[in-house]
């Protein structure tokens, strides 16, 4: 073999050894610490799984300023969904709404304004006057509307939140946390996708006055499609942001930043970190059959099992091939069975370590079979039990 041929062989051998080793090392790289955020509190959360990717002081009770309006519009969306309110209904602007201080939509006293326009005035223009007008139209007065806000907060599990008004103007009994705001934002996006698109609108014109959305990330990052800014002297500069990249949605909350640029920059830093080092996958589709199980004493012999909702996981990047999902079914399924009854679990592991588990449920109901079927299956069940005891 010539010197040249020996040289080529040596290169090939080196490549076969070095390249796989480098890839293995890359896959095992530890996730770096989240970026430092100059704010009173923050949190970064995956929308689909709820996994927290970064946080600091996330349960501190802080003034939310206009981030309050995320709950204001959530309550209004609920009223629309329930049929109690329509987008083309009109609200009459009261003296209180008209005189509300702070950021404004510039509605006129006694003017009748469509609910849809008021919602856009809250979401895009952050109008305090529009917030009060909606509250009064839905609940009769702002105090009763605040009670509705707190009721919805309790249902969502916002355990460290209390609302005193609809616009976020300072009140010592008005507070929330970064974690609770992430929870609320997730619920709003999940429950009302048809209205959430308004949060990405960059400007809105009402009464011949055009105002820009104060969320600077909408112009900086095309993956960002919401959510809301806020500012008061006691709250500082706040921003809840959400971005969608490659079917992965992240929600970041920054409270108490130093200025408008800082709140945008800190949220951008958190979002970039999350997308760079994590990935989200839908492993199983909800309401779809994952397995078919034998049913005893029923009017039929098999039943489909699946999950109540889609199963998502959030994992470090480049570790998808290390995921495993195992279906474990209870041994005996005896009729009658109701749709939604639990009959096992789907267990997910990452590199052999438990990651999460979800209940395996009946996707259909199964009634009891006739007397012949019940007796027949009963005999076989006893025979199986007898054989198992030997």
Image: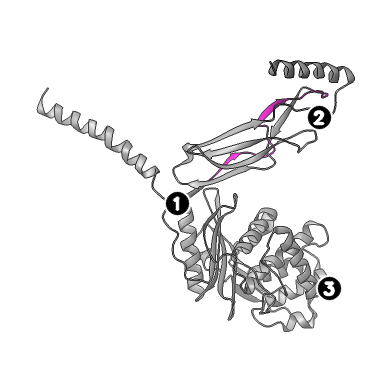
Give the mark toward the camera: 3 or 2: 2
Q: Which colour scheme is used?
A: one colour
Residue at the extreme right of the image, as rendered: 371
349 vs 134: above or below:
above
Give the distance between the C-alpha atoms of the residues marked 2 and 1, in whole angstroms. 45 Å
Report how many numbered discs are placed on residues in the image.
Answer: 3
Q: In this view, does 58 lie to the left or right of 76?
A: left
Q: Earlier in the sequence, mark 2 or mark 1?
A: 1
Within 10 angstroms of label 2, few (less than 14), some, or many (20 or more) residues? Answer: many
Q: In this view, does 305 lie above or below 187?
A: above
Q: What element carries label 3?
A: loop
Q: Which label is found at residue 102?
A: none
**Element type at marker 2?**
loop
User: Which of the 4 image quarters holds residue 333?
Assistant: top right
Q: In percent of the image, x 44 and y 43: which residue is there? A: 318
Q: In which quarter of the image is residue 360?
A: top right
Q: Residue 35's x, y, as percent?
A: 44, 62
The residue lying at 77 percent from left, 19 percent from top is 381
Q: Can residue 125 be seen in this view?
A: no
| Residue that carries the numbered disc 1 in the rendered image | 277
Which of the two labelled residues, at mark 3 and mark 2, occupies the earlier sequence position?
3
Q: Which residue occupies the foreground of this view, 122 or 271? A: 271
User: Which residue occupies the foreground of this view, 339 or 210?
Assistant: 339
**Residue position marked by numbered label 3 in the rendering:** 140
Which span of residues is magenta-colored? 280-300
Which residue is tagged 2? 366
| Magenta region includes residue 355 | no
* Neighbour tally class for label 1: few under 14, some 14-19, many 20 plus, Cα within 10 Å: some
User: In the rendered image of this protein, does residue 113 appear above or below residue 355?
Assistant: below
Q: Are the residues tagged 3 and 1 within 8 Å (C-beta)? A: no
């Amino acid at each position: 073999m010539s010197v040249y041929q020996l040289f080529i062989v040596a290169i090939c051998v080196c490549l076969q050894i070095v390249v796989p080793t480098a890839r293995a090392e890359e896959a095992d790289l530890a996730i770096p610490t989240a970026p430092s955020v100059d704010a009173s509190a923050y949190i970064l959360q995956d929308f689909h799984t709820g996994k927290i990717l970064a946080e600091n002081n996330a349960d501190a009770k802080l003034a939310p300023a206009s981030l309050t309006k995320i709950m204001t519009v959530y309550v209004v969306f609920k009223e629309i969904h329930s049929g109690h309110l329509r987008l083309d209904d009109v609200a009459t602007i009261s003296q209180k709404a008209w005189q509300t201080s702070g950021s404004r939509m510039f509605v006129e006293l006694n003017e009748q304004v469509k609910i849809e326009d008021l919602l856009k005035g809250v979401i895009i223009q952050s109008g305090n006057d529009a917030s009060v007008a909606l509250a009064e139209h839905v609940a009769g007065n702002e105090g009763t509307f605040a009670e509705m806000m707190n009721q919805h907060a309790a249902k969502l599990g916002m355990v460290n939140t209390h609302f005193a008004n609809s616009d976020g103007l300072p009140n010592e009994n008005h507070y929330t946390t970064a974690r609770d705001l992430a929870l609320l934002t997730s619920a709003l996006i999940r429950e009302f996708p048809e209205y959430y698109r308004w949060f990405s609108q960059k400007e809105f014109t009402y009464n011949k006055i055009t105002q820009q959305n104060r969320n600077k990330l909408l112009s900086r990052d095309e993956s960002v499609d919401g959510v809301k800014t806020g500012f008061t002297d006691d709250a500082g500069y706040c921003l809840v942001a959400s971005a969608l990249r490659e079917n992965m949605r992240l929600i970041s909350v920054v409270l108490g930043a130093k200025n408008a640029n800082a709140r945008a920059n800190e949220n951008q830093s958190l979002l970039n970190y999350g997308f760079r080092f994590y990935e989200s996958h839908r492993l199983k589709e909800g309401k779809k059959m994952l397995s078919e199980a034998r049913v005893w004493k029923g009017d039929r012999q098999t039943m489909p099992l699946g999950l109540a909702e889609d199963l998502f996981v959030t994992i470090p990047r480049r570790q998808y091939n290390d995921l495993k999902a195992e279906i474990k079914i209870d041994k005996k399924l005896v009729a009658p069975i109701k749709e939604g009854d639990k009959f096992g679990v789907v267990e997910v592991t990452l590199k052999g370590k438990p990651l999460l588990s979800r209940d395996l449920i009946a996707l259909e109901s199964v009634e009891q079979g006739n007397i012949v079927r019940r007796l027949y299956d009963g005999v076989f069940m006893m025979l199986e039990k007898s054989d198992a005891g030997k």
